[in-house]
Image (cartoon, rainbow, N blue to C red):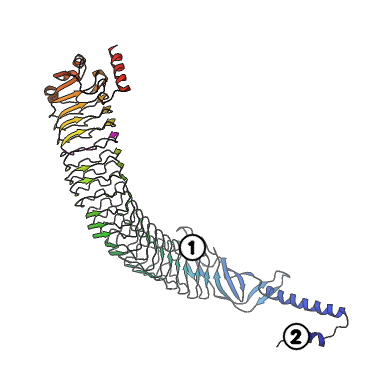
Amino acid sequence: MKIHHKYLYNHIHFKNNTAMKLLLRFLLMVLIALLILPMANAQTVSFTYNGFNFVTNGSNTVTLSGGTGLTYYLDIYFDIPAIAHHIYTTTSDKGTVIEHDDPYTVTKVSDYAFWNRNFTSLTIPNTVTDIGSHAFGCENSGYISPRTLLILPESLTSIGSSAFRYRRFNGQLKIPEKVTTIKDSVFKNCSGFTGPLIIPESVTSIGNCAFTDCSGFTGSLIIPNSESIGFSAFAGCNGLTDSLIIGNGVTSISSGAFLGCRFTSLKLGESLKEIGTCAFKDCSKLKGALVIPNSVTDITFGAFTNCSGFSSLKLGDSVTFIGESAFEGCSGFTGPLTIPDQVTTIDNLAFKGCSGFTGPLTIGNSVTNIREHAFKNCSGFTSLILPKSVTVIGGEAFEGCSGFTGLLTIPNSVTDIAGGVFAGCSGFTGSLTIPNSVTNIGFGAFEGCSGFTGSLTIPNSVTNIGNRAFDGCSGFTGSLTIPDKVTDISFNTFRGCSRFTGPLTIPDKVTSIGFGAFEGCSGFTGTLTIGSSVTTIHESAFKGCSGFTSLIIPYMVSNISNYAFQNCTGLKEIHNRNMDPKSVYLDGTAFDSETLTNCVLYVPAGTISLYRSCNGWKNFVHIVEEEHEGVVGDLTGDGVVDVDDLNFIINIMIHKN
């Protein structure tokens, strides 16, 4: 019923302002009383009962905040009373004692209520709905813990972080169906639990380290609806030895969630998007097919490292990134491998040691980066096609993939062939053409690729060829042309390439020829021309190059090391352009005795006496002077008259003086 204010005005007549003031004062007092009364009723009171401390919550409920519990000899019983009758409370204002006849109900255990306390048994009444963080836990295993069954009441809706951490309960753990979140470290290191662990469908989140090292759980584990599984949530639960089923409600598995577990089968839900770092690392007992759902976009660092029991792998179509060591050591995978077209990066060590794969390796058309060691020692693959999208192939990416056969085609988008990238890929056949986009061929890039049977083409764009780059590539045939921009030929670069034929010219920009650079290249024939800028020919550089018949040594050479031309038994003539033999260190073993005896050493006109009296050179039996054919005034033999020729004359004058 609504009463209009005009009605009140017409029927209540105030004769003076004093009456109105009295009425307003009375109404104000009533209002204040109404506000204060609930506050008085809601006053919290602390009290102790049966060895436990309580704080009232109002509405006849209390929170258990601590206490000593009931002690019987050496045993401490935490038998928490559900109802406390006839509690005497004291009001704070006047100090009077008031008897409370209504029962109090325990609904909550406060944070840290019994943290780091020794006790031998625990009973939680079925009125409790909330257990606070660290309520019954302890910081390590040194505290006395109950060896009894932990019964969590069905009334329970919330369990705080570390609530039972490090306690040694036994028997099966049943999580009430009203619980929605299993928080961080709730049951961490509760190693006494046995039997299966059942996660209710009500649980939507499992926190970090929630069950870490609960090694007593056995059987299978089903996680139906938990949207996220925190890091190390089940790490060390190595008693779970049957199947692991990740339900369709799970979208994220965090780092190390199942690290070291011994499950024998794995099913991933169709809503899963992220598999965290080392999520299943060292789960070596997993068997059967590993199917990555189409919902997954990223497979991060170490996700399945050393899961050696899987027999096959199927990557979902939505995967865009395969992280470092994601499948490293998964040696049980068999059959072919297809990298989906959405993948752009295959990170370091991603499939290293997956030696069981057989058949073709198909890399998707969107891949731009294949990083270091990505497929190292995947020796079972039989073919490789690199897509045109690839721009970077990291060091040792395919090292040891000895099963590859057929031609190797490197896309024009690649600018750098990193160290060891195809080392040991001995099954490739046919010719090898380095694309014009490449500027660097790294150390050991094709070391041991003995199956190539055709020519080797290195474009003029290449400025560096690393040590051992083609070491042991014994099948290459035809001539070898080294690009003009190369400045250094490092050690063992072409060692053992025994089927190259024809003459060899070292470019004029090369300053050093490393030890063993062409050792064992016995197929070369004709003339070996050393470039005009070479100063040092290192140990065994041309050892065993028995097919050369002629050698031209330019003026700039100042050091010919031991065994540099040992066993070059085909040499008939050596043309040394240096006017002053003393400026060149010639090791006594640089040429073998057969060469010193049978080969003719040609020296510049007017220098024969210098050579016959110079250590090393004088060991040649046949020394003959010759006029150098070329540009007049070109004393260094580089085809031009320049400051080098002037320096040449100055050096001769210095040595004569």
In what element is the residue under mark 1?
loop
Q: Which residues are magenta?
A: 480-499
Looking at this view, name the residue that lies furthest to the front. 632
Towards the viewer: 34 or 236 = 34
Q: Position of residue 606 (x, y in %)?
A: 20, 15
Sort mark 2 into few (<14), some (14-19) or many (20+) by Cα contacts within 10 Å. Answer: few
Sort mark 1 into few (<14), some (14-19) or many (20+) by Cα contacts within 10 Å. Answer: many
Residue drawn at point x = 28 percent, y = 32 percent: 510
Which residue is label 1 attached to?
162
Residue 206 position by quadrant: bottom left
Q: Which numbered dot is residue 4? A: 2
Q: Give the side of residue 36 with respect to residue 10, left or right.
A: left
- The correct choice, above or below, for 251 with respect to 16 in the image is above
Q: Position of residue 308 (x, y in %)?
A: 28, 58
Q: Give, as a three-letter code, the residue at label 1.
A: Ser
- The correct choice, above or below, for 650 with respect to 396 in the image is above
Q: Position of residue 260 (x, y in %)?
A: 35, 59
Towards the viewer: 641 or 155 = 641
Residue 137 visible to an observer of this rendering:
yes
Say how many tags the image has: 2
Q: Give the side of residue 593 with respect to residue 553, left or right.
A: left
